[in-house]
Image: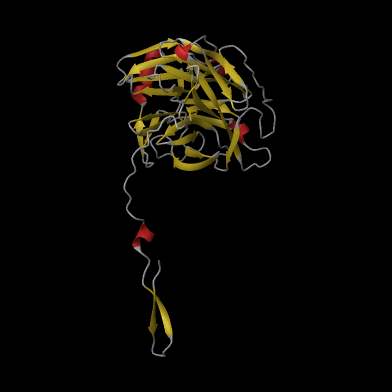
Amino acid sequence: MIHLANLCLSDGKPTQVIEGIPMHIILGAPRQPEPYNDTYPMTSPLALQDGSIQFRLSIIADLDRKSRDANDSSTFNSYLKSGRFTIQPEWKGASIVWNDNSTVSTGVGTENKTIDPDSSQTMYYGAGGRINSQFAFGNRGMELSSLVTFNGKLYACEDRTGIIFQIVDHKVIPWVILADGNGTRPRGFKCEWTIVRDEHLYVGSHSADIKHIHRDGPSVEAGQRWVKKISKEGLVEHLDWEPVYLALEQHLGVKPPGYVMHETVLWSDIQKTWYFMPRQISHENYTEERHPYTCSNLMIYANENFTDIRSMPIGEHNPIYGFSAARFVPGTDDTVIIALRIMEIDEIFSTRIIVFSITGTIHLVEEEVLNGLKYEGLEFT
């Protein structure tokens, strides 16, 4: 509060003197650090009468150039789609019912919805709730590539601006901006995957240093081998993961000009194991024409310091569908994974979902979520 005092000057007229603004208003009062909120998932699972367990599941879209709103060129859109993931006792079955009542199950009663990929409309049936922003880089924005629960909050990372948004009631609030490379480059970090470990959020990119030419002109995707370690207060540390990515490439037998693109990484504190599900693996140089057909179905797993690296196939190999996101199913001791696999050819998109164990057993056969959109983030919410 500003305090006022009356003084009399030589002419006898009173004046007002400001005693001062309290310093805690100017500089802020010291705050005690709040404890980390490890609630996960944010919505408690439901135990059904038949013994099944039901979780709330959400996925988020990356529309690439289609994110620009058709009616407002300064606005960019994404979609947050939610539903209910149900596990039957002893894994006798699993199913997903989305909030628009479309269904994915073990091959039974699947209702696929198709979107015209050339449509200029800004709302898509079955896509989920629209979220938008005017933050952009190079006239592109809201290309959300990961969805994660951290410190009791829901975040999504945008791969053009490098902004990590908190999502609250279908609104996005900027939290942290990640600069590319070691944090000194004048562009946003191309974030692709997120994990939580030791009360920190780790954000990684696809790892591939490639040179390619597309409609935006020639570009070099460099600096993608850095990982960002973020505290709950938003402090960012830049980690050079070159040795990690090299070890994975050596395991796969990939040498330049070949490349590996990572969009799906998990860490299990229970298993003390890293899991990588590369979206693409190529033993040849990058070309726009060949790239969409280099998708992988491999899961790589490694011990904590990457001295023991192994891999196995997950389901059938389809060279046009690659992993874009995954999470451990809560309550399974990190032994069961739910994942998204996406197709992206000439800006025609499709998204599928699959559930499998860390030993390769398929619990939910890969089924289509939506034809016409690609979702690159998945989280239990």
Say if 364 sits above or below 370 in the image.
above
The mark tally for this picture is 0
Name the residue located 45 percent from the left edge and 35 percent from the top edge: 189
68 left or right of 44 in image? right
Residue found farthest to the front: 49
- The answer to whether residue 5 is seen in the rendering is yes
Q: Position of residue 147 (x, y in %)?
A: 48, 31
Q: Quadrant of the N terminus?
A: bottom left
Name the residue located 45 percent from the left edge and 12 percent from the top edge: 90
Q: Position of residue 222 (x, y in %)?
A: 45, 30
- The answer to whether residue 256 is seen in the rendering is no
Q: Position of residue 103 (x, y in %)?
A: 60, 20
Name the residue located 37 percent from the left edge and 42 percent from the top edge: 233
247 left or right of 364 in image? left
Residue in front for this viewpoint, 86 or 369: 86
Residue in front for this viewpoint, 279 or 256: 279
Residue in front for this viewpoint, 308 or 187: 308
Query: Which of the 4 image quarters holds residue 38?
Result: top left
Q: Position of residue 159 (x, y in %)?
A: 50, 33
Say if 118 sits above or below 282 in the image.
below
